Image (tube, rainbow, N blue to C red):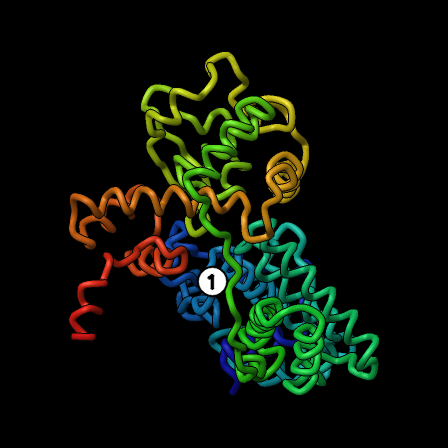
Amino acid sequence: MPNLKELITFVYKNEYESAYDLSVKRNFSNPKIYSANGDLKKRWYVYFSYREPKSGKLKRLTPFYGNANKYKTKEDRLSVLVTYRKVLLRLLKQGYDPYSDNTELHHSLCTMNDVPSAQDLVNKDNKNLRVVPDGPKMTVQEAFDFGIDRKEKLLSPTTKRGYENKIKNFLKWLKVNRPEIENIKDLDKKVVTSFLNDVLDKTSARNRNNFRTDLSSIIQVLVDNDIIEQNFIKKIPILKSIPERNKTYSQYMQEKIFDHLEVKDPILLLYIKFISYNFLRPIEVCRLKVKDIDLNNKTIQFKAKNSPLKTKIIPWILWTDLPDLKKLDKEAILFTPDKIGGEWETAIGNRRDYFTKRFKRVIKDHFNLGTDYGLYSFRHTYITKLYRALMKDSSPFEARSKLMLITGHSSMTALEKYLRDIDAELPADYSTMLRTVHE
C-alpha cells in the first residue's frame, strides 16, 4: 500500500496545478506550512488534521517534510512547501484517507489522461510560481535560464549581469559551432572544453578561467535540482594565469597627480582621496550616498566586496577635505559627474566606468601613464605607505594586525597575500650578508 510520502512525491514530480474545490463534506483541515518563524536551523514542514474514524474528531497527523529541509534559503524552502501543500490538498480532495488503503487512488493518479508528464520543478518566486520542464526535455537555454533564476537572489546586480553575459556568449558559440546540441543532457565536458579553448585563443587564461567558474556554478545548480547527473565542468582544469595588477605610484608622481587635480578636477581628486585615505575600492566609492557619511561620529558605511555592510572611520586627513554635507539630500549620490551630492540615474557599473575614463582623460593621458597605472594604484600606494610606516615601530605581526583593522581585509591570510602581490614588504639591505658569502 502506498504511503502518504509516496503519493505526494508522485504528484509533486508529475504535476503542478492549482487545487480545485469539490462539493463534498471535508474530513480534513486545510494543510498549513510551519516555517519556524524563518529559522533555517529548525525543520519546516506541512501539517494537517484528519477525522479519526472511531472518535469522529479531527486529529493532527504526522507532519510531511519531504525534501524541503535540504534547501538552505527561505525562498527555496518555502517554494517547495507551498507546492507540497497544494499537492496534499489535491490528494485529500481526491479521496486520500490516512486510515485506509489508497492503492486505488494511486492507480487512478498514474493513469490520469490529463496529468502533465514533464513538470517537476517550481520557480522559487512564490508571487509568480511557474513550472519548468524536467531534465529529459529541457533545452540548454531553458536549463541556463533556470540556473540563473535559482541563483538570482544570491547575486548582486553586477554579478548577475556577469553571469548573463558569459552564458549569452556560450549559447551564441554553441549555436554556431555545435547547433545539433539542443537538450541539456547532450552538453558534456568535451563541448565546454572546446568553448573554453576558443575563449583562451581569443582572450586570456584569466578570462577563460572566469568563464569556467561561472558556467560551472550554473551547472552545479542543475545538478542540485536533479536536472543533470554531474558537474562535468569541475573536471576541466584551471589554467595558470598571471594576475593583472596596478603598480604603485612613486612619491613624486603621486604628488604631481594631486597637484594637477587640485586645479583641473577637484571632484576627481576627492574621489581618489576616498580610495587613497579610506582604502575603498573604486566601485565602493561609486556606491556612496550622502547618508553613508556619519557627520557626528566621523564614520562611513559602505557595501564592501565580501560583506553586505562595513563601517570605517574617516581619517582627519580626509575629513578636512569634505565639503559641508549637512544641507544635502541624504539620498543623493555622493559623487556625480558635476558635483558632490546629486542625482545620477545610471547603474553602479556605469558610474565606475565613467570615473575610470575620466581619470584616463585627465591624468593618464596628461602624464603619459601606461596601462599598469590606474585608480586602484592609489589604494596600493597608500596601503604600502601605511604598512611601511607601521613596520618602523612594530613587529611584522603587530603591523599587519593594525593594518587589517584599517584596510578591512577579511583575514590575516588575505591581507598577507595582498601585501605580497603589491610588493609592500621589502627586505632590509642584505649587502653585509653577501659580503660574508664572498669572504
Q: On the picture, is 313 further left or further right than 392?
A: right
Q: Secondary structure at mark 1?
A: strand
Question: Viewer-proximal residue, 178 or 116?
Answer: 178
Asked where in the image residue 8 lies, by quadrant, the reply is: bottom right
Q: Residue furthest front?
A: 439
Q: Is residue 32 above or below residue 330?
A: below
Q: How many marks?
A: 1
Compared to residue 110, the image places residue 148 above or below, namely: above
Q: Position of residue 87 (x, y in %)?
A: 60, 67
- Disc 1 marks which amino acid? Val
Write the residue at 33% across / 55% down: 415
Q: Residue at x 36, y 29 (%)?
A: 314
Q: Nearer the viewer, residue 318 or 368?
A: 368
* Residue 370: x %, y % from top left: 59, 50
Q: Is residue 418 visible?
A: yes
Q: Position of residue 63 (x, y in %)?
A: 42, 66
- Residue 292 percent location from the top left of the image: 45, 29
Most distant residue in the top direction: 327
User: In terms of depth relative to the viewer, which is nearer, 27 or 284?
Assistant: 284
* Residue at point 39%, 35% (across, down): 277
Q: Answer few, some or many: residues within 10 Å of disc 1's Cα (few below 14, many 20 plus, some between 14 and 19).
A: many
Q: Is residue 244 left or right of residue 137?
A: left
* Residue 108 seen by the camera: no
Image quadrant holding the C terminus, namely bottom left
Depth check, front residue: 230 or 389: 389
Q: Which residue is mark 1?
A: 46
Q: Is residue 113 above or below residue 264?
A: below
Residue at position x 45%, y 48% in the image = 248
